[in-house]
Image: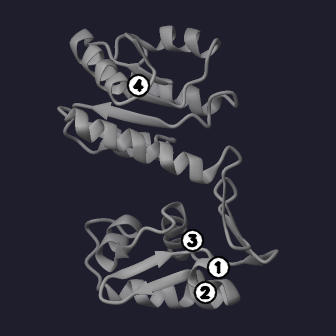
Amino acid sequence: MIYCVEDDASIRELIIYTLKLSGFDALGFEEGDAMFAQLSKQLPELILLDIMLPGKDGLQILKELKADPRYEEIPVIMATAKTTEYDRVYGLDNGADDYLSKPFGMMEMISRVKAVLRRGKKIGNDGMITFSDVVIDKKRRTVEAGGRYVELTLKEYELLLTLAENKGIVFSRQQLLEKVWGSDYLGESRTIDVHVGTLRSKLKEYGSCITTIRGVGYCLKEEEDGK
């Protein structure tokens, strides 16, 4: 079940129609209070949340969702028509999983919904990501390998997290730079090679899970997959 909170009836109906056409169950709400009333009856797999709403805006609703233990793990995709970055950054910093900039296409929406749901399944309800004998705790931002605590820098952690959340997917160096350092980063792609090298060293025998794809970039595989 997916909930859509959107005050424009025509947009809301199109979103619900497209979600159902794509195989999802979906319910639409004009404002946040109606959605919260339904949350007490049924928890959705994901919430599509518009920022510009009557009464409480989407950012206020997001804060309430993330402050409530009953709802904090529900993935949220924010939708905004604003051209400034502030709302998008604020939403992502306060727990949103992704955002859509209006006007957006229905195929893009479905693609983002599926991507966020896939990530949620890999992470699990306890916020843990595992591969081989490595455990990443997203809530505590810690990494253990073979039961041993691994001390990582912020960028090493974010690089490992990006690869682990997308196990089996090959990333180019440029893609990893943009995801971890940001699209405005002016450094060289060799930065990725250096950080992968230190990650492999710190993970010791599990470092081989980070696989080099010659001529392309890197991919994370389970230990046994690389044998």
Q: Is residue 22 left or right of residue 194?
A: left
Q: How is the image coloured?
A: one colour
Q: Position of residue 22 (x, y in %)?
A: 34, 30
> Looking at the image, is mark 3 or mark 4 earlier in the sequence?
4
**Are circles 3 and 2 on residues that touch, CB within 8 Å?**
no
Q: Which residue is mark 2?
A: 227
User: Which residue is label 1 attached to?
Assistant: 224
Q: Find residue 225 and report its image quarter.
A: bottom right
Amino acid at the residue labelled 3: Tyr
Tell me the element at label 1. Answer: helix
- In the picture provided, is 206 more to the left or to the right than 106? right
* Mark 3 crowdedness (10 Å alpha carbons): few <14, some 14-19, many ≥20: some
Callout 2 touching callout 4 (CB < 8 Å): no
Q: Viewer-nearest of labels 4 and 1?
A: 1
Give the mark, 4 or 1, whose residue is nearer the N terminus. 4
Q: Residues within 10 Å of mark 2 (few under 14, many from 20)?
A: few
Q: Amino acid at mark 4?
A: Gly
Residue matched to label 4: 58
Q: Which mark is residue 157?
A: 3
Spot occupied by residue 63 in the image (x, y as percentages of width and height)? 53, 30
Residue at point 61% right, 52% down?
123
Position of the C terminus, as image quadrant, is: bottom right
Q: Residue at x 17, y 32 (%)?
A: 103
Q: Secondary structure at mark 3?
A: helix
| Nearest-to-viewer mark from 3 and 2 | 2
